[in-house]
Each structure stands twice: as structure tokens, then as C-alpha cells.
Image (cartoon, rainbow, N blue to C red):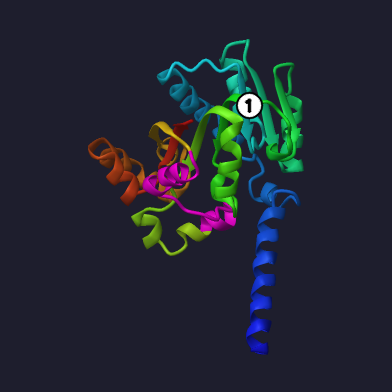
């Protein structure tokens, strides 16, 4: 009995240490060292996907908030391209990313260091949660906490789980090491997660990040097969070849 309790205590300490390690990489500079641009180079492309969803549904938000805004580049792109009566807020937990945001602030674009769940802001017209939930240990808790804070929410979720990533031994581990992805989704599990946490799905579509932005050898090699397969059957292309993310509009 004593041995079992000791093993359970060691296991609990190990899990806590692991959790703390992944939480701290956004604060101690480790994530910045591996991703020095904090993915700002992808921001114009992401903004295009968001604007496409907004235009498809004739949304006219006057307040927009991004949770985990990183370097703030997506919000700056939207700030420059949306109506001048729209105001923007970005929340970021990483001090390093927040420093990258600060020079981009304007009268209509504000950044705050901290967790939006600790803020007392009124609900926003539109909330953006872009490539965030795969990083968090308790993403169910975050999703439930965010739902009352906006009228509409746009999620961008990478679909890391595919036949080719499962077959390639290091594919998922690379995402874990370089980008700190703790969870891996398919279209079906991503959408069901949102339903399970109380969201009403309005629309979704695939975004071809690896096809349009990929620079690695495997991404270049799979570009044409992905495009051909996607033209024939979108779900099959994402499920087998991977390289796609999901943009979701929810209430």
C-alpha cells in the first residue's frame, strides 16, 4: 500500500512539473527562441480567412477581441482593413509577445498582458481564438469560460491528426516540440469539442495553410497531391494528407 501511494505521489508531481513546464515556455522565452517571429509572418493570410468568414455572414462587429493574440499582427491587419468605427483588444499571457504587440497599439487597437478571464470587460461583438486551444492543457475549461464573453466567436484550429502524420514517426512530436501542441484534432473532434462546451456552430471551412504557406520539404512535396485531392474530396484530403486547419464561426 505504501509503495502504491509513493508511486501515485511521484506520478502527480511528474504531471504537475510537465504542466508547469509547458505553461512557462510562453513566459520564460523558450517559445520565443523556437518561434522568433511568433508566427507574425502568417498573419496577413489568417486575416484574409477571418475577413472571408465575416463577409460571408455579413457581420458588422464594432468590438473585436483576440485571445492569445501573440505578436498582435492579426489584429493590426484587421484594424487596417475593417471599418474605422471598430475597436480591437488583444490579450496575451507571454511578456515577450506582449512587447512585440506594444508598438502596434493605436487609439482603436489596445493590448493587455494577462488572461482575459481575469478582466472585467463587457462582452465583445466578435472574439477570435486562433491556434490557441491545442496549446492548453485544460482547453475545455477555457472554451466554457470564453463563451459568455462574445456574441460571435471565430476559431482557427489546426487539424494535426491525419493518416500521414500518424504514419510518419516524428510528425506529431515535432509539433509538440516546436509549437507546443498538446492536443491533436480532426475536423470531427474539433467541431464536437465546440458543441460539447456549449457553442452553436454557424459555419466552418478548411484553410490550406500548408498548401499556401508551407516552406518545409514535406509541405512542398505534398502541395500538389493535397490540391488535387482537396478538389476531389475535401474531407478525404484533410483526413489522409493533412496540412489543413479549420476556421469555425460559432455563437
Would residue 225 be seen by someone viewing this image from the given angle? no
In percent of the image, x 28 and y 46: which residue is there? Answer: 236
Span highlighted in magenta in the image:
174-198
Residue in front for this viewpoint, 201 or 167: 201
Q: Find residue 134 and report its horizontal and vertical position in percent.
A: 54, 49
**Residue position for label 1:** 123
Relative vertical location of residue 204 with respect to residue 177 in this rendering, above or below: above
Is residue 204 found inside the magenta-colored segment of the image? no
| Farthest-out residue, left | 232
Element at label 1: loop
Is residue 194 found inside the magenta-colored segment of the image? yes
Q: Find residue 237 and report its horizontal and vertical position in percent.
A: 30, 44
User: Which quadrant is home to the N terminus?
Assistant: bottom right
In percent of the image, x 26 and y 39: which residue is there? Answer: 228
In percent of the image, x 63 and y 85: which residue is there? Answer: 4
Would residue 4 be seen by someone viewing this image from the given angle? yes
Magenta span: predominant SS is: helix
Q: Find residue 203 and report its horizontal and vertical position in percent.
A: 39, 30
User: In the displayed structure, does residue 60 sit left or right of residue 40?
Assistant: left
Q: Find residue 68 and report its horizontal and vertical position in percent.
A: 64, 38
Amino acid at each position: 500500500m505504501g509503495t502504491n501511494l509513493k508511486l501515485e505521489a511521484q506520478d502527480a508531481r511528474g504531471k504537475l512539473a510537465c504542466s508547469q513546464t509547458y505553461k512557462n515556455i510562453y513566459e520564460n522565452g523558450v517559445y520565443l527562441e523556437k518561434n522568433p517571429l511568433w508566427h507574425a509572418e502568417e498573419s496577413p493570410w489568417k486575416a484574409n480567412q477571418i475577413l472571408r468568414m465575416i463577409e460571408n455572414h455579413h457581420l458588422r462587429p464594432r468590438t473585436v477581441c483576440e485571445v492569445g493574440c501573440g505578436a498582435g499582427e492579426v489584429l493590426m491587419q484587421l484594424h487596417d482593413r475593417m471599418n474605422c468605427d471598430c475597436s480591437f483588444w488583444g490579450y496575451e499571457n507571454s511578456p515577450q509577445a506582449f512587447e512585440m504587440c506594444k508598438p502596434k497599439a493605436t487609439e482603436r487597437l489596445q493590448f493587455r498582458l494577462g488572461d482575459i478571464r481575469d478582466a472585467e470587460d463587457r462582452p465583445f461583438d466578435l472574439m477570435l481564438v486562433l491556434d490557441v486551444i491545442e496549446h492548453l492543457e485544460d482547453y475545455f475549461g477555457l472554451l466554457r469560460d470564453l463563451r459568455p464573453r462574445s456574441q460571435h466567436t471565430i476559431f482557427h484550429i489546426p487539424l494535426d491528426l491525419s493518416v500521414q502524420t500518424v504514419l510518419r514517426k516524428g510528425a506529431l512530436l515535432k509539433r509538440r516540440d516546436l509549437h507546443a501542441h498538446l492536443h491533436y484534432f480532426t475536423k470531427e473532434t474539433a467541431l464536437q469539442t465546440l458543441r460539447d462546451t456549449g457553442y452553436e456552430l454557424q459555419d466552418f471551412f478548411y484553410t490550406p495553410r500548408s498548401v499556401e504557406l508551407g516552406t518545409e520539404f514535406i509541405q512542398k512535396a505534398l502541395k500538389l497531391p493535397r490540391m488535387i485531392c482537396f478538389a476531389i474530396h475535401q474531407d478525404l484530403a484533410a483526413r489522409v494528407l493533412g496540412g489543413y486547419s479549420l476556421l469555425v464561426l460559432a455563437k
